[in-house]
Amino acid sequence: MIIKDSQDTQGLIIEDENSVLMFEDEQTILVKKFKQKLLSDLTYHINKKACYGLIESSSGTRLGQINNFDWIFYPSEGKECQLLLLGDTSWRSGYLKIYGKCVFTDLKNEDFNDPQKTRQINIILEFISKDVTIDEPQEPESPLDDIRRSMM
């Protein structure tokens, strides 16, 4: 899936979890394992700061609830890497941007004991190619083009 981000760069959302990432140290990792590691790290930080999405005072009084939040992993311009998509024969050089999104369940009438049931976390990987080429739609060649060329 091709998307445009706010800076008008063209990015590829990596959806195939069997694709491979290679970073500067030439360490390779499957996209699936990389996302699992990011999910684990993000879950740890969410548990540390907002286990159920609740905001409480130091006395324990409930002040409110977080509905959702977006997380952008730094560096925001992306981490330099190479991507090998399933089926490709060569590596693509570029930058990896990493986004996390956490949506909390409304707890007003719920009694959850497991924080995992109170939220949904998604990790999105966007690859920005160093050699971005935007294919301009080309008009189909007309049978008259040969005649026009011969007249020039």
Image (cartoon, rainbow, N blue to C red):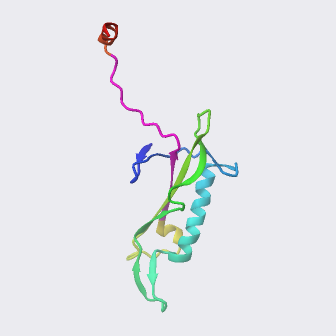
Quarter of the view holding residue 92: top right
Residue 32 visible in image: yes
Is 144 located above or below residue 76 in the figure? above
- Looking at the picture, does residue 113 appear above or below residue 138? below
Q: Residue at x 59, y 34 (%)?
A: 88
Residue range of the region highlighted in magenta in the rendering: 120-141
Q: Residue furthest bottom?
A: 59
> Relative to residue 108, is residue 104 depicted above or below?
above
Q: Residue at x 52, y 76 (%)?
A: 49
Q: Is residue 116 above or below residue 18?
A: below
Q: Examine the rendering and report whether any part of residue 14 can be seen.
A: no
**Quadrant of the rendering where the C terminus is positioned:** top left
Front residue of 78 and 33 = 78
Residue at 56% of width from left, 71% of height from top? 45
Left-right relation of 20 to 98: right
Residue 21's x, y, as percent?
A: 62, 47
Q: Where residue 2 sits: x, y (%)?
A: 43, 43
